[in-house]
Image: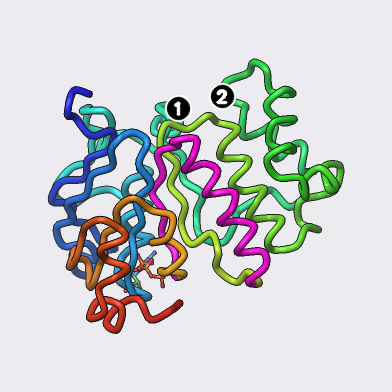
Amino acid sequence: STGVPLLEVGKLATGYGAGDVLKGIDLRLNAGEMVAVLGANGAGKSTLMRAIAGLQRPVRGGIALAGEETASQPAHRMVARGLVLVPEGRQVFPELTVRDNLRLGGFLRRVAIDADVEAMLERFPRLRERIGQRAGLLSGGEQQMLAVARALMGKPVVLLLDEPSLGLAPKVIADLFAALDRLRAERMTLLLVDQMAGLALSLADRAYVIEDGRIVAAGAASDLAADKALERAYLGHT
Ligand code: ATP
């Protein structure tokens, strides 16, 4: 290793006009790490994910992918460089079939797409049963699986997942986290925002806690999970 993190966010500040939502965020993601970002509603987690994905411009500070500054690049350039966001609210193309949603996820690569679709169906067996159906007819959990599978079709270098468990039933959340655990075992580099703090910490190597646009705690996921004061203050959701 060269010591350069795969993703580095430095002193990042951004917002939506009236004051900063993020007030100086420092965060790093090493290759092969799974890192969780936790915090209450409105803390700025989605804004951070959108900024990293190139969908929200920094007002101050920077973001670098493999040592190269990204903040001035548009979102589609970030996708081409391997930084793929699965946004909150599982955005699949409802009128397209499951198969076409998956194929679109591999569109930038153009080769071996059918083999990769098959690999996704092996990874998410529920999608195989639904392969010819319109995505809009899937259950919420199936749509979330599809959103993750579509992102993986792009062979991301860094996968950003924003609230994948939101609104899903416990059994479906367990299936989803099993799929994330497999990605962790495969050493996918993954940044995960989720309200299910206990579950997220049980998977992640490290975590950051955001409060009001600032990092208020960071460290090994196991240390944060064992921190009772932190649990009471921020991690009350699980
Ligand atoms: P949640 O879990 O509720 O999504 P979050 O930690 O992801 O919370 P953000 O969605 O980043 O938080 O929102 C942080 C702050 O920015 C909130 O005060 C929110 O109201 C505000 N905000 C988010 N998106 C916009 C927007 N498009 N325009 C204006 N303000 C916004």
Residue 104: x and y, percent?
66, 33
Q: Is residue 178 covered in magenta?
A: yes
Q: Is residue 97 left or right of residue 213?
A: right
Report the residue that reaches farthest toward the bottom.
Answer: 232
Question: CA–CA distance between discs 1 and 2?
Answer: 7 Å
- Under mark 2, the amino acid is Leu
Q: Is residue 174 covered in magenta?
A: yes
Q: Could you tell me which residue is drawn at 46 percent across and 45 percent down?
A: 85
Query: Which stretch did the figure color magenta?
Result: 170-195
Report the residue that reaches farthest toward the top.
Answer: 111
In the rendered image, the vertical position of residue 8 relative to residue 168, given as above or below:
above
**Mark 1 or 2, nearer chain start:** 1
Ligand 1 sits in quadrant: bottom left
In the rendered image, the vertical position of residue 170 relative to residue 151, given as above or below:
below
Residue 187: x and y, percent?
44, 36
Residue at numbered disc 2: 108
- Under mark 1, the amino acid is Ala
The residue carrying pointer 1 sits among few (fewer than 14), some (14 to 19) or many (20 or more) residues within 10 Å by Cα, namely some
Residue 232: x and y, percent?
29, 84
Q: Quadrant of the N terminus?
A: top left
Residue 64 is drawn in which quadrant?
Answer: top left
Residue 150 is drawn in which quadrant?
Answer: top right
Front one among 151 and 61:
151
In the rendered image, the vertical position of residue 113 relative to residue 139, given as above or below:
above
Q: Is residue 186 left or right of residue 55?
A: right
Residue at numbered disc 1: 80
Q: Is residue 179 left or right of residue 230?
A: right
Q: Could you tell me which residue is drawn at 72 percent across and 22 percent down?
A: 115
Residue 63: x and y, percent?
23, 40
**Ligand 1 closer than 8 Å to label 2 CB:** no
User: Regarding mark 2 in the picture, which secondary structure is present there?
Assistant: loop
